[in-house]
Image: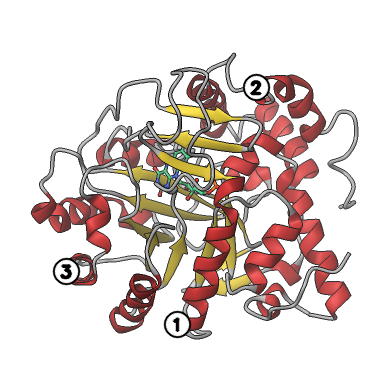
Amino acid sequence: MSPSSSAGPLSSGAFYQRWLGPVLARDDGLDAEQLSRTALTALGQASLRRRWPGVSTVLDGVAADLQRRDLRLEQVLFGCRFPNPVGLAAGFDKNGVAAGIWDRFGFGFAEVGTVTWHGQPGNPKPRLFRLAEEQAALNRMGFNNDGAKALLKTLERQRLDPPGRRPAVLGINVGKSKITALEQAPDDYAASLELLSPLADYAVINVSSPNTPGLRDLQDTSQLRRLVERLRRLPACPPLLVKIAPDLDDESIDAVARLAFEEGLAGVIAVNTSLNRLGLEQRRLSQTGRTLAEEAGGLSGAPLRQRAQEVIRRLRASAGPALPLIGVGGIDSAQLAWERITAGASLVQLYTGWIFQGPDLVPRILDGLLLQLDRHGLRTIAEASGSGLPWQD
Ligand SMILES: Cc1cc2nc3c(=O)[nH]c(=O)nc-3n(C[C@H](O)[C@H](O)[C@H](O)COP(=O)(O)O)c2cc1C
């Protein structure tokens, strides 16, 4: 496949920028949550019907444009074969409606959820704000999702290939239901995981979203240990990763790395959105007239990038080379993906950058990673992970 196939005038990237570029260049105008919901409705229908002739032709066209198949990008981590190191981060496909087609968009893996045991509406709207100039977002969605039983049905209806035989790895990200008391959290997570584990290639314990009161207290090592040990007692448990906040101090990051080793976790995902305002304290939201310092919610996108990079570096230093890390936060170019990987991540995930840049961000990153492997004389992306090798223009 030609590396430049996503650059043509009829490519997915050009199409996206033509129609959505003007919308994404402004804070107001079309509502960010409504846009995502509309896109997901269409993608959900396409996933259900992906084997129908007309639909599969369109999806084949998208895949021809966005996928890059190259053995140098492949890795086996915690028993899962990742065809490439770029994944869709949790929170975009919360209900797993498009789980059957994320590979077509070039992703090597996709994480659905966060799912909670009890379906819940989330916080009042508006709860998702674009910060166009900063290429960032503020969200206080509050785990709006249809619940674990609904996710099971949604995934079953899509007739996915079984774990281990899918074109892209599927992670399921699990959180605590709002109505469940913090002391009961382990049973709440366990109920979701027990139901969904047969469908998951890996599972994520989300203890880092800022929009569920008390949730981040579960990052405390004694609470996290209790939670992990409860999940470990399930009859069948997929590889378990934990997702942490960017707002942890260095000692707490080290403690998570130690716990991951002691409890045999499959890996750590760093980072979730930030409660810090990262220099944007006085930035006003046009929709509410209030500053970010006054608004509740987690910040994502470009302003998060530096902290996300520091957390990966710290985790890699304290965990040593063996623990797989997934780097997420502010990645919107091949260079940033390369730098996150060479700082210690094995895989990276995209959310805010993917929305702003459009679907051809994935092949642009994959092409860029392959070029860096060539420039540094490396054979595989695994050799780049934690190598500290710089980006070479
Ligand atoms: C609107 C929105 C919803 C999100 N929902 C979730 C979620 O449900 N679970 C989760 O673990 N992370 C969630 N995230 C966090 C992302 O997965 C990611 O960790 C974070 O946004 C940093 O990456 P980015 O800068 O590339 O967006 C959400 C992010 C956004 C912007």
| Residue at the image point whose x is 44% and y is 58% from the top | 246
Q: Which residue is mark 3?
A: 226
Q: Are marks 2 and 3 in contact (CB under 8 Å)?
A: no
Q: Which residue is mark 1?
A: 318
Spatial CA distance of label 2 from label 3 is 45 Å
Determine whether the residue tagged by mark 1 lies in a helix, strand or loop: helix
| Residue at the image point whose x is 18% and y is 71% from the top | 222
Quadrant of the snapshot with the C terminus = bottom right
- For the question of whether residue 358 can be seen, the reply is no
Q: Nearer the viewer, mark 2 or mark 3?
A: 2
Judge by depth and name the residue closer to the eye, 111 or 314. Answer: 314
Q: Which residue is mark 2?
A: 26
Give the amino acid at mark 2: Arg
- For the question of whether residue 302 can be seen, the reply is yes
- Looking at the image, which residue sits at the far front? 282
Q: Are marks 3 and 1 in contact (CB under 8 Å)?
A: no
216 relative to 58 in the view: left or right:
left
Residue 377 is situated, as x and y percent measured from the top left of the image, at 85, 81
Q: Of the residues under marks 3 and 1, which one precedes in the sequence? A: 3
Residue 368 is situated, as x and y percent measured from the top left of the image, at 80, 59
Q: Quadrant of residue 156?
A: top left
Judge by depth and name the residue closer to the eye, 240 or 209. Answer: 209
| Residue at the image point whose x is 66% and y is 35% from the top | 356
Judge by depth and name the residue closer to the eye, 219 or 365. Answer: 219
Q: Is residue 95 above or below residue 377?
A: above
Give the amino acid at mark 1: Ser
- Looking at the image, which residue sits at the far top? 29
Give the amino acid at mark 3: Arg
10 relative to 387 in the view: left or right:
right
Spatial CA distance of label 2 from label 1 is 41 Å
